[in-house]
Amino acid sequence: MTTDPLVIFTPSGKRGRVPVGTPVLTAARQLGVDLDSVCGGNGICSKCQVSPGVGAFPKHGLTVAEDALSPINKVEERYDRVRGLTVGRRLGCQATIQSDVVIDVPPESQVHRQVVRKRATARDITMNPATRLRYIEVAEPDMHAPTGDLERLGDALRVAWEVEEITIDLPVLTRLQPALRKGDWKVTVALFQDHNGGPHRVLDIWPGFYDGALYGLAIDLGSTTIAANLADLSDARILASTGMMNPQIKFGEDLMSRVSYSMMNAGGAAEMTAAVRDALGRLATEIAAEADIDPRLIVEATVVCNPVMHHILMGIDPVELGHAPFALATSDAMEQPAANIGLTTINPAARAYALPCIAGHVGADAAAVALSEAPHLAEPLTLIVDVGTNAELLLGNREHGVLACSSPTGPAFEGAQIAHGQRAAPGAIERVEIDPVTKIARVRVIGCDLWSDDPEFATATAVSGITGICGSGIIEAVAEMRMAGLIDPSGLVGSAEATGTDRMIPEGRTHSYILHDATGEGGPLITVTQGDIRAIQLAKSALFAGARLLMDEIGVDTVDRVILAGAFGAHISPKHAMVLGMIPDCPLEHVTSAGNAAGTGARIALADIDARAGIEARVRKISKIETALAPRFQEHFVAANAIPHATASFPNLSAEVTLPDVSFNTGSGGEGGGRRRRRRG
Ligand code: FES
């Protein structure tokens, strides 16, 4: 009795015996090997390419003969002639197994291929999209066995692709009959199946074999800006990125003012819903134009946002999120027609998936950050801070699990409530350095790489001007003022006399610091006022107190690392954030930026439906701490008001930076007139 040939697939290492003459694709399916196919083995798509090995494979104890696979057949010859087949490659659906063989499946032929993310610490993305292309040959209608075209399409999909049940929306159904006849009963369908294993939904249909790509939108809907990435659904490659201001700003700068707008104005919530949905539609059109693709090929979208944005987008009045107990209408993920949320300019049958919310103040954006950064898998105790109008914090590791809270930082970190504050835009001061001796600052503005003490600076910034201070600029300014001894630990701004510099100017009973003076050239005078310092102190105290509450819950005084998420987090200097006491002390090199982690989470959810199931399960396990109800929040908030902190020690910071021991409290009721005390160290 002869034994069947042994086939070993690499890199998976899966092996088994199959009868002589078994196509490689069939063997792969039987052995559970990840080998792609769109045409179902018809020799059309070339997705099933493999590289058979020849010769000795001592590792596998196998010698592979030259003719271990069947000779190249006509289909492969034709494919090679028309499209070109890389030397050494075979079409897995055409080549059959004749004797023992080792077959390599190259990455591009793997269905669940890994996409390596740029950041070294980031986990790879596994491709497993909800929508796939399937080529199918459908039986022609028969007078004697009358069935509908859709039923025969379903039968063919069941046989070729093991698709149990299909569903189709009417607009797609209207295109089925012409497509079948035009394609001579061969069509390609875009089939969507959600991660809960529901019926397969036919999203689109093409006559014959459709050889193009499908795309998805990963949308990060923030209170201030809306950002979107357009990704290829076969490899998560980003083809275009775009952003726009959230038009809801006209209804209120921050989240609570938008909730108030809804409470105070009949139909206010609906107005905001319409505005944001309209913006999403425009954004989709823009991004398709930028990538030069047909918007119809965008068949999916994923959305991350905070709870208020989430409810408004879904058309749910956010009023319940405006007061305790901050009840969400639902915290579950939502999957629905994309057109429902304003994405009317893409494929009419496209689907949209909104990630789950964590709690009334901790949204799908934080869930997306958890998906991207996976703190539950980390060894070090990791604090993730997503700074915005409402800071969202996650703390955890493998040992402790993950806790979450949000903290009402207010808009100061975004440049609001600051005398010369502005949003991050060209011309805004984003970097600050104060000379510890002269007390003179040099600054850098967005859109120009030169520092202000460079002779070319004035010319280089002539177009943008120097228009104000953005969030990262004000953080650096306040921290630098503390390092230069111009404010004391309580946040009091010193007078010219107390600090020994005429950069301090009186302003009522307080003092301001001249950050940039271009009045000599007809430019602006930009100062940091006592009020600015107070606004930043309130914001950073809220942030620190939130982190502290989470640390209390775990029972620790320190964290091992801090990840600054969000577009803003990417621009914050770790040293300055720590001098200010925004974040708890930890080694400075362990404070990193994750960029737009929420946006990355949206991209991962787009690429991998298992990630959707994973984050839904994980969100249920995240412990939520409600800052508004926590008795110790106020205590932590007050202690965190000092710069960097009234009681907590910052040993890692102290090792790098010596903060002057100054006090400007005159005790006379006025602010900031006191004498300088000796410097420490
Ligand atoms: Fe499509 Fe082989 S499966 S060419």
Image (spheres, grey):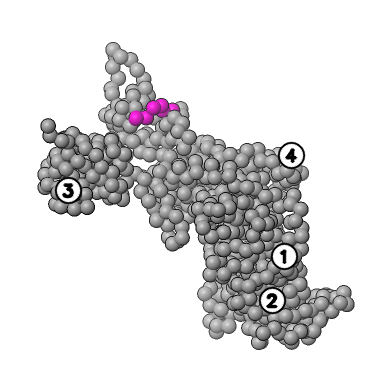
The residue closer to the viewer here, 662 or 355, is 662
* Sequence order check, earlier mark of 4 and 3: 3
Q: Quadrant of residue 383?
A: bottom right
- Label 1 belongs to which residue? 640
The picture places residue 171, in percent across and down from the top left corner, at 45, 30
Measured in 3D between alpha carbons, the distance from the residue under mark 4 to the one under mark 2, in whole angstroms, is 47 Å
Q: Which mark is nearer the camera, 2 or 1?
A: 1
Q: Amino acid at mark 3?
A: Leu
Q: Amino acid at mark 4?
A: Ala
Measured in 3D between alpha carbons, the distance from the residue under mark 2 to the one under mark 1, in whole angstroms, is 15 Å
Q: Amino acid at mark 1?
A: Ala
Image position of 438 with respect to 401: above or below: below
The residue closer to the viewer here, 334 or 545, is 545
User: Looking at the image, which residue is at 17% across and 48% down?
Assistant: 62
- Label 4 belongs to which residue? 266
- Label 2 belongs to which residue? 482
